[in-house]
Image (cartoon, helix red, strand yellow):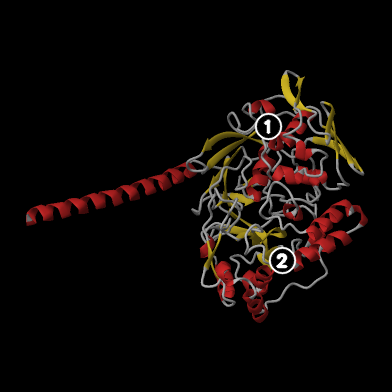
Amino acid sequence: MIRLKFRLIILLIFLALTLIAGLIYFTNKNKSNLYTAFAQTNNNEVISVNMSEFPQVPWGDDNSITVHVSETFSTAVHGTLANINYLRNIDKANETTLLKDYICDSKNCFATLKKGMRFHNGREVTAYDVEFSFLRQPLIKKFDFATSILNDLIDIENTAKNKINYILVNGIRYPSGIIKGIKVKDIYNIIFYFKRENNFFFQKASEGRIPIVPIEEFDDKYIHWKHFPVGFGKYKVVAADYKNYIFSLERFQNEENIPKYIKLIFTDMNIGDVKMSLEGPKHGFSPYDKKIIFPNISSNMGFIFNYQSELGNNPNFRKALSLALDREKIAHLSLHGEMTPEDQMLPNFGWHKEYRAKIDIQKQNVAEAKKLLERVPHHLWKNKIIAIPTFWANINSLDYILEVKRQLSKIGLNVEFLETDPNYTEFRENDPNAIFWSGFAFASDDPNRNFAFFYKSPIYVREYPNDRKFDELFLASTQYMSNGPLYTQKLSEYFTKNNIMVIVANTRMVVSYDTRKIASLGLQPNGSKLLLWEIKAHD
């Protein structure tokens, strides 16, 4: 009996060791596969760009795609609708743009396409492709970034309800004439009609969230690509390793003197000739890495509230949370010195300055924060750990996040920052969570762009504060933009003082490159996107 028990124990130990060895083998094998795939890029014709520690496919309509990934990929592959203002030196930037020219007159915009612009599949880009690309997401009832960007177009909210008419152009069947806000005159000319004056339409419409795409490369429902994304940009997609998150691009025009191949990779391993978005401690600290902190503010960060929750909808709670924070101390703990303290939506930088509220940044006031928190029903927060979903890689390894937790604990709020879940990028129906740690990028010159996320829309339903005064100020700011910054300043002040979002800091994009292979990043407009063709390898 004793021998049987002994043999059983030995067998169990053997099985356990075998299982552990197997797990280690497969883990190392996956890493080895990634290293092998990466090693194959180790020549000057191929430049690898580590886009993010957070694995993601760089195309699609998914909210989980971070802005710098979407903008970088879309600019390289899909091209750009129009030159936008923050590319101060357009000729040197050498972007592939579709529009020859455009002009806006009050509530109308007229645009003319360049002739001879071709998609990677060989056919010419037409105005019908622009119309389809703008309406594709609303047509499939995907109320996403496209809707917020195009919300000033007349009838845009009725896209999926209106009768769909079809037109045959050069053998291709397009849905066309669906809304009153878009009219195609001919294959090179298109007109846009707005509900209100819109001076920033082409800046917003040129974001990577609305790429100009060929309809024939999608399935019948316009949702999925038949193969890889197709655009008219400088690079075409030629391969995708969805398991290891490696995506291969090849230059479209061989005569262009730009890198022939680009590999976009997504991993927290310290690999890549160029590394973007140095969020965690694993990237950018090699002795061969040269770090660049872009001067432009790329995004903000802070607390977004679920206004359909009792806690998130409580103004005393939101104000207490804001007053609990020493923003200077938090920003000082950033990894690369890329953060600055902030409490307004618009940063105190560049053209944004004149649209900001003329108020000082909020100072920490622990005593007042405690008083306000005591007015919040105790069952919502007292003796509880409040879970905070995030959209940050390795969130709990960051010193400034640990400092945020420490400061909130001083007023009696115990919080836990959750690791990123790629399937959970916004509040859901009946969501038990009241706070989300996230932020908004500054990819557009429109000062109202990020305020629009809090205006009533079918996109961020639970983030909408249902505040009539805010709605009035937002509409006034968008309608009277040409009259000067006063209305936006009032909107900024109301947004800040009512803690509609508690902004904690602004951040700049940090990029590094391996000096053994890369000579320079070339001319880069800002940190919100990387112009891949500008990267120069050593000869």
| Of residues 151 and 380, the one drawn nearer to the viewer in this rendering | 380
Q: What residue did someone put label 1 on? A: 253
Mark 1 touches mark 2? (CB < 8 Å): no
Secondary element type, mark 2: loop
Tell me what residue is drawn at x 66 percent, y 65 percent: 339
**Image height of 171 relative to 176, above or below:** above
Q: What residue sits 45% from the left and 46% below the top?
A: 35
* Marks 1 and 2, the one that precedes in the sequence: 1
Q: Which quarter of the figure has residue 237?
A: top right
Task: Give 59 or 463, whichever is nearer the viewer.
Answer: 463
Q: Secondary structure at mark 1?
A: loop
In this rendering, is residue 222 above or below 473? above
Residue pushed farthest top?
A: 171
Say which of 458 and 5 sits in front. 458
Quarter of the picture holding the C terminus? top right
The residue where tag 2 is placed is 499
